[in-house]
Amino acid sequence: MAHQSDEMKPAPAGYYYLWHLAALGVLTADFGPSNEPLPPNNESALRNAASPVISTSVWDAIADRGAISPAKVALIDVGISPDHPNLATRIDHNASIDLATHRYGARALEILDDTNSSYKEEKQAFFSGLDISGLGNLGLSNDDKEYLDDIVAEYAASNGVLRRLLDSNTLFASHGTACAGLIVGEPAVLLSEDGESPSPPENILTNPDSTEAHPNKNPNLLPYFGADPFSRLVNITTSFEEDARQFIAAFLYAYLQNVDVIVMPRGIPDPKRSAIEPKNELKADLERWANRDAADLFARIAVAEQGSVELEPKASQPGSNPDRLWKILKRLIIGVSRKIPVICAAGNSGESQLIYPASLAAPDNGIVAVGAVTVEGFRSGYSNYGEGLTLVAPSDDGEVFNRHQLRIDRLSPFTAKHQYSADTGKEYCYSRFSLLSTDLPGVFGYDEGKAPWSSLLPYADNPGVGGGYYTSFGGTSGATALVGGVAALMQRAHRAVRGGSGKLNGIAVKNILEAASNRNSNVEPGLRPLTPDCMNADNEDVIDPSYFFGAGLLNAAAAVSAVLNS
């Protein structure tokens, strides 16, 4: 199979830039009839992906119930660009916190002018009033509970800082900025004197050229929408360090802020719980006679890696318990999730197991483990899967070339230079659809100020102030961000029905999300229902579809309708 047949053409490159909201059911989009009937095997057949007719939205269904206060979503990530035009009014700057650069939290303030600027750090008690008694029994031993109580008391009495310095989020927040756009991005508007913006105009999707609907005159800005552009985002900045205390503080702060949803679009580097276990499929392969030499090699490597614990700086030392904080963090995440849904990414390594803390998802908690699927109806080539996966959401794809499957971008000029053969494996159609999202402007953004999305704009020669504002995004991070936005929609719908500022607890949100998901759905504008693939084992595609997709593809309209009609 060196060359692809005419019947197996990949998806066209052009597509509606908010296709993922249609696939998720946030928007009702008519992509028209399919160009051809879907063949019985792996060939691609899409509707008119570039020019759908948008009719209604989930936002309209909620708005019909009257004015509702926005939901509050905590994003625990590497930060968010604080002044991105599509995000500036959606970020709750007075509640956001940086836990990466200060143990007790930091917040950056703008320097007013050269003559009235102060670089002195001012104290700020970010954790004042912290009390976790509402979480109930976390399942900790008496010693560990006392240890956590001491941590809580220390933070409740602590002081962080207010800084009149450069905000670190303007340099290192590309991932968080992209996730934030998918959750709460809104059309850029001119700010009023009080710094606020009007709600996104109702007609902007059907008439994006209207000056009333899109008053910001910057020609590089899109009428961009996240899953819930009417909610607000609390930015909780954390680093990639193996620092359990930092993440304990992040979840304590989210709980203190009484947020409605917590989004974790990346893993937590717990040295024990984030370790990938040997795959059952691989162990089974190694037990075969034909692979005995490889099995012997793996055994010898395992012995060599044990080494001497004296040379391991992170090994347990006499008189210490380095796992205590990590164990407390695990119980804290589970406890918080029962009160507030915690939406977690399944991971991007293509493994048949989930990363941590998505791997903690269970029926008795509110942790939602999210995988990614493509418009072609397959699991995204990189998306983790397996037991514990809650549901899936639309995202981009990843190329795969192993003995079980071949999935490559045959429209790429690099692919054209090589001959690829599926050999004994199977070939799956690669999707060229990705998630368009907000980018960190400038050289620290994903696209370094370039504009790969320029075909969408009439002014492609002007990349915007400080660089590009948008980027192609994806991964299970992108899918997780979209589900986080849907969870925010559900909380707003709950208030529309019940009134006040109440919210659904984490387990209730998770149950509704699962009930609103379907393993037989098509990923619009595609026509193929969700279809298992062989990734890590021969004939793996015969395993129950829940192994690859959990409860299935989330439908936001069904989830919100369930809340509105409860």
Image: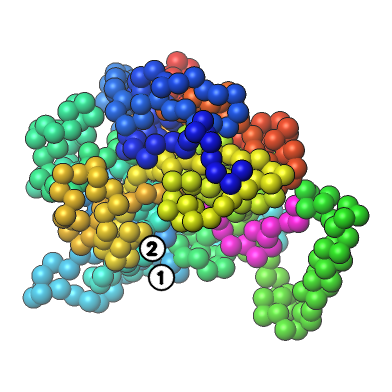
Residue 345: % across, % down: 54, 47
Relative vertical location of residue 169 with respect to residue 556 in this rendering, above or below: below
Q: Nearer the viewer, residue 329 or 454?
A: 454
Q: Which span is picked out in magenta?
A: 262-279
* Residue pictured at 79% horizontal, 81% vertical: 308
In the displayed image of the protein, which residue is found farthest to the top? 565
Q: Is residue 323 visible?
A: yes
Q: Is residue 197 left or right of residue 410?
A: left
Position of 350 relative to 144 (above/below): above
Looking at the picture, does residue 303 appear above or below residue 353? below
Residue 20 % position (x, y): 40, 35
Q: Is residue 354 magenta?
A: no
Viewer-proximal residue among 538 and 240: 538
17 left or right, relative to 116: right
- Residue for badge 1: 101
Q: Nearer the viewer, residue 111 or 155?
A: 111
Give, as a three-letter code, the residue at label 1. Thr
Is the residue marked by circle 2 packed among few (<14), some (14-19), or many (20+) residues within 10 Å?
many
For residue 108, side relative to residue 359 (left or right): left
Q: Secondary structure at mark 2?
A: strand
At 14% from the left and 37% from the top, the residue drawn is 214
The reply to whether the C-beta atoms of the residues labelled 1 and 2 are less than 8 Å apart is yes
- By secondary structure, the bulk of the magenta-drawn segment is best described as loop
The label shown at residue 91 is: none
* Amino acid type, residue under disc 2 in the picture: Asp
According to the image, label 2 marks what residue? 98
* Quadrant assignment, res 158: bottom left
Could you tell me how far apart the alpha carbons at marks 1 and 2 are, in whole angstroms? Answer: 6 Å
Please tell me whether mark 1 sits on a helix, a strand or a loop: loop
Residue 324: % across, % down: 67, 64
